[in-house]
Image (spheres, rainbow, N blue to C red):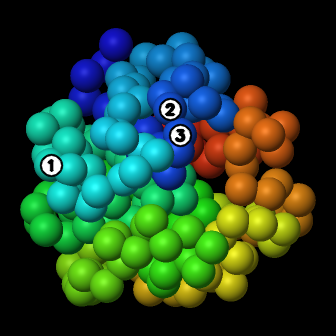
Amino acid sequence: MNSKRRVYIVHGYRAKTSDHWFDWLKNKLENDQIAVTILAMPDSANPQKEAWLSYLKQHTVITPHTYFIAHSLGCVATLLFLSRSGYQIKGAILLSGFLRELPEIPELDSFIGEKINFENIIQQIPDRLTIAAEDDYIVPFSLTEEFAKAIQAPLLKVSQGGHFLGADNFKEFPLLLTEAAKMINS
């Protein structure tokens, strides 16, 4: 493994490291000699902001060659972690991100509301990309559009992808692999 390039995959609410496309993406990137860790965020069925941020601090080694690929609540946690720490990373791909409360999931409200310095985030993450599906039934597409604008990241729009879950037929995610490989190998 080329330890210079490291990717951390941060899952979202109610997810496990073995869910959705996480293992598939890890295996594909490792085939390209990229070190990948899927972070097992604590108690994902009852996420607590401080526990998640503490976990990120304890289980990541940040260098200028670090990348994050985060999904849903993982996007919010990743931005909060970077905002608080001031760490400089190489890039991030953020899927189905949001910065507002989701009325259907009040369990996530504690993650929303803390001020994030977006000017600093833009400096801390020079390579940024967001991905969202227009038919996302958990995080409305408009919220990910707003998220992308806040961090000044290009938004890659998928017409049909739901919330990019295994239940949405996302056991593999070739588009994400292509974008990750482009970002990491550029």
- Residue 61 visible in the current orientation: yes
Outermost residue toward the right in this view: 160
Question: Helix or strand or loop: what does disc 2 sit on?
Answer: loop
Q: How crowded is mark 2: few (under 14 residues within 10 Å), some or many (20 or more)?
A: some
Tell me, yes or no, whether the two marked residues, 3 and 1, touch with CB atoms within 8 Å.
Answer: no
Image x and y of residue 116, in percent = 26, 81
Type of amino acid under label 2:
Lys
Q: Quote the CA–CA distance across marks 2 and 3.
A: 4 Å
Seen at 25% across and 29% down, the residue is 4
Q: Mark 3 points at which residue?
A: 15
91 lies left or right of 22: left
Q: Callout 3, which amino acid?
A: Ala
* Residue designated by label 1: 54
- Give coordinates of residue 87: x percent, y percent: 14, 58
Q: In this view, does 112 lie above or below 126?
A: below
Report the label total.
Answer: 3
Amino acid type assigned to the residue bearing label 1 in the image: Ser
Residue 16's disc number: 2
Q: Residue at x 40, y 75 (%)?
A: 109
Circle 3 Cα neighbour tier, 10 Å, few/some/many (<14 / 14–19 / ≥20):
some
Image point (74%, 30%), residue name: 171
Q: How far apart are marks 3 and 1 (CA)?
A: 18 Å
Query: Of the residues under marks 3 and 1, which one precedes in the sequence?
Result: 3
